[in-house]
């Protein structure tokens, strides 16, 4: 076989693992952009070392070992990524300013399902995969030390046996089990619940339909009735976050009034329903990108509204148009 054919064969074998490796690195790193960089680095290292890969482990295990080492190196010099709720107490809906934007590298970011979840036709597997990339869960993972994070993802999310995880991390089964216990204890103190996107669920479709109609009409009475009593709203990279329907309504009627007249384009982000939000253009014509909105749903209500304002990077990532006419 020619060198070119061999190269093509290796690349095709590696590419088959891109979505699941990106999902793994995303859970580890909290940023889909960093996750894609980590996977690319993993593939470069694997391609260069492929002739030394002797098949003593499966190709999948070998790639996960490389990807884990890449992520652990990246996390060694990185600040922990957060959501605004991790930075301090909730603000007031009557606030006149949301605070100065914080640097991109401190925020947990959203991810399109197509980038971080492998294709699967089994509905139960699809739901389980979506649950493992929920925004609150990925944010909670960032509270764990990097090696604990790897153990929990490999054992709890990907269902690897303890022995395989121990071999991947060059440690003992006892150490893996201990790390898993500590990771579980940390996550137990963090609320990671949210309903995943279920496109065939009539109740969820009806709730989302009411949300879109109320938001686009800027009917704050109707919108408030859809909010959970403990609902939160945040707008990374701005540090301000709000809790409770009254504060969110006050914000939308005051400082956030510029969202009146917005249009929403549906997307799926982190296994959850979301929207590309376009506000009326300052030119007076059409609508310009404003936010990538991820909704957390719980008990038939909207429990979290996270509006990511970095539209220059996020709208192309989610395949959203540059503007609406």
Image (spheres, rainbow, N blue to C red):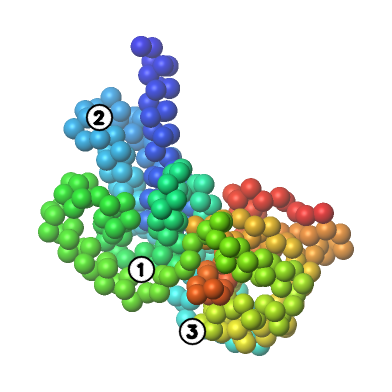
Label 1 vs label 2: CA separation? Answer: 34 Å
* Relative depth, front residue between 120 and 4: 120
Q: Tell me which corner region of the image, top left, top right, bottom left or bottom right, holds residue 147.
A: bottom left
Q: Using the image, determine if residue 285 lies above or below residue 143.
A: above
Residues at discs 1 and 2 in contact (Cβ within 8 Å):
no
* Relative depth, front residue between 179 and 106: 179
**Between discs 1 and 3, the one toward the N terminus:** 3
**Label placed on residue 53:** 2
Pointer 2 local density, CA inside 10 Å: few below 14, some 14–19, many at least 20: few
Is any part of residue 26 visible from this angle? no
Q: Tell me which corner region of the image, top left, top right, bottom left or bottom right, holds residue 323.
A: bottom right
Position of 74 with respect to 183 (left or right) is right
Residue for badge 1: 143
Q: Residue furthest top?
A: 1
**Label placed on residue 89:** 3
Q: How many marks?
A: 3
Q: Quadrant location of the C terminus?
A: bottom right
Q: Secondary structure at mark 2?
A: loop
Q: Quadrant location of the N terminus?
A: top left
């Amino acid at each position: 076989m020619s060198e070119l054919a061999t190269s093509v064969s290796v690349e095709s074998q590696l590419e088959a693992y891109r979505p699941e490796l990106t999902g793994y690195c995303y859970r580890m790193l909290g940023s889909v952009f960093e996750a894609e960089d980590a996977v690319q680095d993993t593939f470069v290292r694997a391609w260069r070392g492929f002739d030394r890969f002797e098949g003593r482990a499966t190709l999948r295990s070998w790639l996960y070992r490389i990807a884990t080492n890449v992520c652990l190196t990246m996390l060694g010099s990185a600040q922990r990524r957060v959501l605004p709720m991790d930075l301090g107490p909730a603000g007031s809906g009557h606030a006149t300013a949301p605070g100065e934007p914080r640097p991109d590298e401190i925020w947990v970011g959203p991810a399109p399902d197509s980038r971080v979840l492998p294709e699967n036709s089994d509905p139960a597997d699809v739901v389980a995969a979506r649950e493992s990339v929920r925004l609150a869960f990925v944010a909670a993972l960032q509270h764990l030390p990097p090696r604990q994070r790897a153990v929990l993802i490999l054992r709890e999310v990907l269902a690897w046996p303890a022995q395989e995880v121990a071999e991947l991390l060059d440690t003992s089964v006892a150490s893996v089990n201990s790390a898993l216990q500590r990771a579980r204890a940390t996550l137990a103190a963090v609320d990671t619940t949210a309903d995943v996107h279920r496109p065939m669920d009539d109740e969820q479709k009806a709730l989302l339909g009411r949300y879109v109609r109320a938001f686009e009409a800027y009917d704050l009475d109707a919108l408030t009735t859809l909010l959970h009593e403990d609902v939160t709203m945040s707008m990374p990279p701005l540090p301000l976050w709000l809790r409770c329907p009254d504060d969110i309504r006050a914000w939308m009627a005051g400082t956030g009034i510029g969202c009146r007249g917005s249009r929403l384009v549906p997307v799926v982000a982190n296994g959850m329903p979301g929207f590309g939000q376009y506000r009326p253009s300052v030119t007076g014509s059409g609508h310009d990108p404003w936010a990538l909105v991820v909704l957390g749903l719980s008990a038939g209500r909207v429990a979290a509204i996270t509006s990511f304002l970095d539209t220059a990077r996020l709208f192309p990532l989610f395949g959203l148009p540059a503007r609406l006419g």
